[in-house]
Amino acid sequence: MNNFSLLILTFYIIFVIYVFYRMFQSLNVEQEIKIQLDRQELNKQLSEQEIESLMDIELGEVNLKEQLCTLTINIENKSQKTPIIVDWDKSHFIDFDGRSRRIIRLIPQMPIELVQTQAKSFIAPTKKLKESLTTEDLIKLNSAGVWEITGTLVDDKRLQEAAQKGQHFFLTLILQMSNPVGGVKSDRYYAISGKFTLNFNKSPWTDNIRWKPPLPGSQQPQPISQTGKGK
């Protein structure tokens, strides 16, 4: 191989390496959004209402590689003797535009009837409750009489815009428990508003080449429940 051929080969190798470098770099520039519960704000509310020693709330894992159709929350009753009751019908989701939306608790293998009052959840002392939630406006009745989730809590574009602007969304839970102060036995209601923040995280390049599931309703729906309507 003469010097000219060696020079051509060297330039070719450099060019190939550069092309692969640019491809790899393009995969890394994409950033993913991470949703987190604002612990400082939550602890402040619990402290102001004097129940920080009685309960705690955590956000379940949020996978934004899929559509954001539900939120999973964990509520812990840290009390030794006071039960906590969660009133779902009085609880609500507030989106980035300040719109209040009714919360629907999703119960596996149980029918959903949107016009009826939702049963409250009872959390015994020292126990935890884990629930998957969505909003009423996302649940529609299809032609087969089956309720299904047909949209997202927040679409991807709005999520990106909100993250760039530093906007937040909120989940307000209405909780009922016996008054823990001074031995008074009367029940009290507490409104705990979970503030959710959005942060950009650079995603690994391997995550950016994964298949993204389609929006619910764009293919054969997965039934939530059977109501008996439409039969």
Image: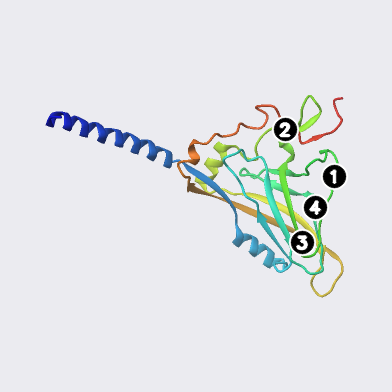
Of badges 3 and 1, the one in the foreground is 3
* Residue 29 visible within the image: no
Q: Which residue is mark 4?
A: 87
Disc sitting over residue 191 in the figure: none
Q: Quadrant of residue 117?
A: top right
Q: Are marks 3 and 1 in contact (CB under 8 Å)?
A: no
Of badges 4 and 2, the one in the foreground is 2
Q: Amino acid at mark 1?
A: Thr
Q: Amino acid at mark 3?
A: Lys
Mark 3 and mark 1 lie on one chain; the one further toward the N terminus is 1
The answer to which of 43 and 150 lies nearer the viewer is 150
Q: Which residue is mark 3?
A: 127
Mark 4 and mark 2 lie on one chain; the one further toward the N terminus is 4
Q: Amino acid at mark 4?
A: Asp
Q: Are marks 1 and 4 in contact (CB under 8 Å)?
A: no
**Residue 113 position within the rendered picture, expressed as x and y whole percent measured from the top left:** 83, 38
Q: Which residue is mark 1?
A: 117
The answer to whether 93 appears left or right of 88 in the picture is left
Q: Which residue is mark 2?
A: 222
The answer to whether 26 appears left or right of 116 in the picture is left
Q: Secondary structure at mark 1?
A: loop
Q: Quadrant of residue 7?
A: top left
Mark 3 and mark 2 lie on one chain; the one further toward the N terminus is 3
Figure colour scheme: rainbow
Mark 3 and mark 4 lie on one chain; the one further toward the N terminus is 4
**Residue 99 position within the rendered picture, expressed as x and y whole percent measured from the top left:** 67, 43
Q: Secondary structure at mark 2?
A: loop
* Residue 110 visible within the image: yes
- The CA span between labels 1 and 4 is 10 Å
Q: Are marks 4 and 2 in contact (CB under 8 Å)?
A: no
**Residue 208 position within the rendered picture, expressed as x and y whole percent measured from the top left:** 48, 38
Is residue 182 placed above or below 71 in the rendered structure? below
